[in-house]
Image: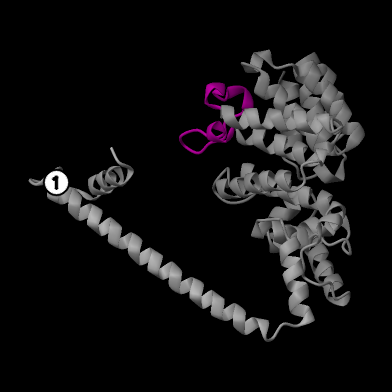
């Protein structure tokens, strides 16, 4: 069947609500004619637009200024290719401290509330509010231009950009507020951003580490809640419903990160932890001693109370609750975990065991 006739058949079938008419030949000819007229109208519209653009360029050439030339050069060099990622790079300016960059960017560009950002950083909400206000004042006082950094200046902002993307994904993966356990739109934003970033900076190991982490974590999205919207714990999830393409993408990105020398990067280590679960056919087959070793390495690279609490859970799974309980008890006075509900939950589970 010729391509145009095949197209006509498809369009005609899609537009018919009463089945095949009495005269199929005439019906198809009418559909093909309408399709051809639509195509001619599109060509005419495109031709008019090209003429308008040509006239606009002719008019602009008579009023070219140095500023206009600089703007054109900046536009040519701006290869980021995504409006949201472009804004994140712009907002993560080196004039701001690292913690302030992430908070401001998440608030103004990520769309997160001050409360959501505070929970992500495990600090009081007034602290985050003060950081955001201070950041705005700093940008205003130093008259920082709102512009996309050139390729050679992006490395100084990369750490903050990665943190912002990861925190956006975390908020989508486990919402800190609202009635829904997840916010899929934020997860989709993070997935899109990290994939674009990997194309933009292919030689940065931590970029691929973040890609691996988010892809593998996102592979479990469909089974993290049951039919009633209740969370399903990792050991109880139906692993046959995990997304194989996302897992493959994540594992490939992890290998890329390790090949670039980033095996001990913060995101690569977390991705390696997620990979242990992704590779296990069942919860019982999970390599918990390996997970403990990875948490040990993560505690050396980026020690935080949350990492130590997760390490305690891994220790309990690998070596028993009695080995893990002293680790959890040592965290009871950590200020960052004072209102962290997982601390008493983990301790209660260990005591029950």
Q: Is residue 19 left or right of residue 243?
A: left
Residue 352 lies within the magenta run:
no
Q: Residue 299, percent across and down?
A: 88, 32
Would you place residue 124 above or below residue 332 in this image?
A: below
The outermost residue toward the left is 22
Q: Residue 262, percent across and down?
A: 85, 34
Q: Is residue 352 left or right of residue 324?
A: left
Colour basis: one colour
160 and 176: which one is in front? Answer: 160
Q: Residue 344, percent across and down?
A: 75, 34
Which stretch appears magenta? 220-242
Q: Quadrant of the C terminus?
A: top right
Residue occupying image coordinates x 14% and y 43%: 20
Q: Main structural element of the magenta stretch: helix, strand or loop?
A: loop
191 and 77: which one is in front? Answer: 77
Residue occupying image coordinates x 27% and y 45%: 5
Q: Residue 231, percent across and down?
A: 57, 35
Residue 226 lies within the magenta run:
yes
**How many residues crowd mark 1 within 10 Å: few (<14), some (14–19), many (20+)?**
few
188 and 208: which one is in front? Answer: 208
| Secondary structure under the numbered disc 1 in the rendered image | helix
The answer to whether residue 6 is visible is yes
């Amino acid at each position: 069947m010729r391509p145009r006739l095949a197209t006509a058949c498809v369009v005609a079938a899609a537009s018919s609500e009463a089945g095949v008419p009495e005269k199929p030949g005439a019906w198809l000819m009418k559909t093909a004619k309408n399709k051809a007229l639509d195509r001619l109208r599109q060509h005419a519209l495109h031709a008019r637009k090209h003429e308008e653009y040509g006239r606009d360029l002719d008019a602009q050439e008579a009023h070219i200024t140095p500023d206009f030339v600089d703007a054109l050069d900046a536009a040519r060099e701006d290869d980021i290719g995504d409006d949201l990622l472009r804004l994140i790079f712009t907002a993560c300016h080196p004039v701001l401290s690292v913690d302030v960059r992430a908070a401001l960017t998440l608030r103004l560009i990520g769309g997160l509330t001050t409360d959501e950002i505070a929970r992500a950083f495990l600090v009081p909400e007034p602290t985050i509010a003060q950081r955001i206000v201070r950041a705005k004042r700093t940008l205003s006082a130093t008259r920082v231009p709102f512009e996309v950094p050139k390729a050679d200046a992006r490395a100084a902002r990369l750490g903050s950009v990665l943190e912002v993307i990861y925190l956006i994904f975390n908020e989508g993966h486990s919402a800190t507020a609202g009635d829904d356990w997840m916010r899929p739109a934020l997860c989709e934003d993070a997935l899109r951003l990290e994939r674009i970033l990997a194309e933009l900076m292919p030689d940065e190991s931590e970029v691929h580490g973040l890609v691996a982490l988010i892809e593998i974590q996102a592979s479990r999205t469909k089974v993290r809640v049951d039919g009633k919207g209740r969370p399903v714990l990792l050991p109880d999830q139906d692993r046959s419903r995990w997304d194989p393409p996302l897992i493959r993408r994540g594992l490939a990105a992890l290998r890329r990160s390790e090949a670039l020398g980033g095996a001990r990067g913060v995101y690569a280590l977390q991705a390696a932890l997620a990979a242990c679960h992704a590779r296990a056919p069942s919860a019982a087959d999970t390599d918990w001693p390996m997970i403990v070793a990875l948490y040990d390495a993560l505690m050396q690279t980026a020690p935080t109370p949350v990492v130590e609490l997760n390490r305690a859970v891994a220790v309990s799974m690998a070596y028993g609750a009695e080995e893990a309980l002293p680790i959890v008890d040592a965290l009871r006075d950590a200020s960052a975990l004072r209102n962290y509900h997982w601390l008493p939950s983990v301790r209660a589970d260990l005591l029950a065991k």
